[in-house]
Amino acid sequence: MASRPLGVVIVDDEELARELVREFLVSHGDVAVLATCADGFEAVKAVAEKKPDVLFLDVQMPGLDGFEVLELVERDAEGRPAVVFVTAYDQYALRAFDANAVDYLLKPFDRTRFDMALERARSRIGAARPAAPAAPLREGPLRRVVVKSGTTVTVLPVETIDFVKAGDDYVLLHAGGKDHLKQQTLASLEDALPKERFVRIHRSYLLNLDRLKKVEPGETGAPTAVLADGTRLPVSRAGAQRLNEILGR
């Protein structure tokens, strides 16, 4: 019985770049191009629906960049696709390999270099993969948070987030009057968000200081943070101390 073709999804906002990757794949008879995508949103949807073995992924794209796409790609027990980053910028190489990428193709590349990347992807697929890639290195605090619900992706600029609440294995981000759920710990998100804007006021809450109207005693006498829209959040003793230090009280 013949083995099934190697499923590939190509993601690049430049049509010529997508066509070049497709052209280089033609000579490989055991490869099937499942989808070509012009942006990160299309990529997330295509990976969820097509379940490719290999993802050729551009880094700089409108909407979602390549690292945000990789963050949102969720797969079943078979694991995530083998990822080959494709970009014209070499400064992202460290982040790419830290994110467990198979290879990093720097434009312009020739057929020989491309075939090498494809072979590395084959080797990764044939070998046991780690359960999940390491968290990508960040270049400074987050400027936006991406949230996926099914095939819908929402991008939240950090300044639009009112507060973050911890759940069991997720966080709830309240922004623009809506709640968004994301699989991430509160501690890791706290570490990633701008320290000058977000402060841990309670073991279960991160607050955007721009939304804070006042701090007043609650019904039990414990401090309560009152937001500009009237939302009331609990403040722990340690959280009150942090607020006092930041607000200069």
Image (cartoon, grey):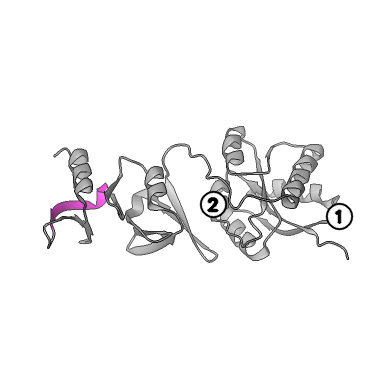
Question: Would you place residue 197 above or below residue 77 in this image?
Answer: above
Near mark 1 (Cα within 10 A), the count class, few <14, some 14-19 or many ≥20, is few
Q: Amino acid at mark 1?
A: Gly
Most foreground residue, 221 or 116? 221
Q: Amino acid at mark 2?
A: Glu
- Name the residue rendered at 81%, 38% in the picture: 112
- Could you give the CA–CA distance between mark 2 and mark 1, rounded to whole angstroms? 31 Å
Give the quarter of the image for residue 142.
Answer: top left
Q: Nearer the viewer, mark 2 or mark 1?
A: 2
Furthest residue toward top: 91
Near mark 2 (Cα within 10 A), the count class, few <14, some 14-19 or many ≥20, is some
Tell me the number on the disc at residue 29.
1
Q: In the rendered structure, does residue 31 fall within the stretch colored magenta?
A: no
- Name the residue rendered at 39%, 43% in the picture: 191
Tell me the number on the disc at residue 71.
2
The quarter of the picture where the N terminus appears is bottom right
